[in-house]
Amino acid sequence: MGTAGTGADATVRERRQLINVAYRLLGSLAEAEDAVQEAYARWYALPPGRQAEIASPGAWLTTVTGRVCLDVLGSARARRERCVGAWLPDPLPAHTERDRGHGADPADQMVLDESVTMAFLVVLESMTPAERVAFVLHDVFRYPFAEIAGVLRRTPAACKQLAASGRRRVRDARVRAAPAVQADVVRRVKAAWEAKDIAALVDLLDPAAVMTADGGGMVGAVLRPVEGGSRIAQYMVAIADKAPGLELLERSVNGVPGLVARRGGAVMTVAAFDVAEGRVSRIWAVRNPEKLRPWVG
């Protein structure tokens, strides 16, 4: 894990990789930043002689970051279950959409690929902490099980089994549509939503579609998932009726086409979609203001 060498330059170069690892493990930019900061704090707390003995600071930092994330995951599940309404991972804007005035770091350091789509992160949330760490480190970042064993304090064989279990969860999840197909469906959802056309929305939504919203207990959001294409369509139109002047924008959300709702120039909601067989099967609407800070208002 990481690069060999010692000194400040060797450790600073690892920050981008560590942020990317921690976000995929935790689904939260703030928690990822805290985990990486804790790892660096522990590194700088080492006596110089001990630092000099470490052949690969990057490997050391990755191990410590992984262990910190593992501890966070252990407590986060209970904490998130106590949240008002649903908890969703932080939505990530494209590089061009990052708000430079409100903490673009660590969002600025994120690599947007298939392992950060909202659909993928939601599947990761279903894993046990140990499964998630083993799967993400091995399948996403290609770390060998011998090194992952040092993070989880388990045998390489046990880590291999954990990653395989996580892999089955991902494999059982619905396959995401091609970007061009998703972009087309999202564009048509936007047009139907703006027109308040319930029939058109119903046609674009899978009959078994589910919409989940995260208001963080800070803003209004449906507390339980809305199930069924017809109910979701009616709910979306009701939102539009209650929010005159709402502006919908097509934007990249976690690397795939999504929608951003603005009102009075401020970002109110970021919506991510899962599309299968030409219809929307899942909608994740993030309204928690703390999670929208990287987005341009």
Image (tube, rainbow, N blue to C red):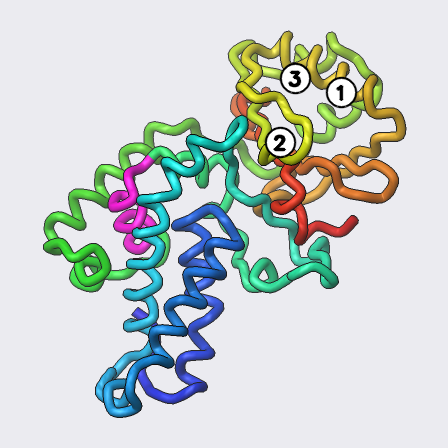
- Foreground mark, 3 or 2, reads 2
The crowding category of the residue bearing disc 1, from other C-alpha atoms within 10 Å (few below 14, some 14 to 19, many at least 20), is some
Residue 198 in view, yes or no = yes
Give the residue at x 35% y 35%. Answer: 170
Prevailing secondary structure class for the magenta stretch in the rendered image:
helix
Q: Amino acid at mark 3?
A: Leu
Q: Is residue 63 left or right of residue 154?
A: right
Q: Amino acid at mark 1?
A: Ile
3 or 2: tag closer to the N-terminus:
3
Q: Is residue 275 left or right of residue 14?
A: right
Residue 181 in view, yes or no = no
- Foreground mark, 3 or 1, reads 1
The crowding category of the residue bearing disc 2, from other C-alpha atoms within 10 Å (few below 14, some 14 to 19, many at least 20), is many
- Measure the alpha-carbon separation of dots 3 and 2: 17 Å
| Corner quadrant of residue 79 | top left
- Measure the alpha-carbon separation of dots 3 and 1: 18 Å
Task: Provide residue 240's location: percent of width, then percent of height.
Answer: 80, 21
Task: Provide residue 101's location: percent of width, then percent of height.
Answer: 74, 62
Give the residue at x 64% y 14%. Answer: 232
Which secondary structure lies at badge 2? strand
Give the residue at x 72% y 57%. Answer: 99
3 or 1: tag closer to the N-terminus:
3
Task: Provide residue 78's location: percent of width, then percent of height.
Answer: 37, 36
Instruction: Read off the magenta span.
Output: 127-139
Count the labels in the image: 3
Give the residue at x 54% y 13%. Answer: 227
| Corner quadrant of residue 280 | top right
Q: Which residue was labeled with disc 2?
A: 285
Which secondary structure lies at badge 1? helix
Disc sitting over residue 239 in the figure: 1
- The quadrant the N terminus occupies is bottom left
Q: Which residue was labeled with disc 3?
A: 204
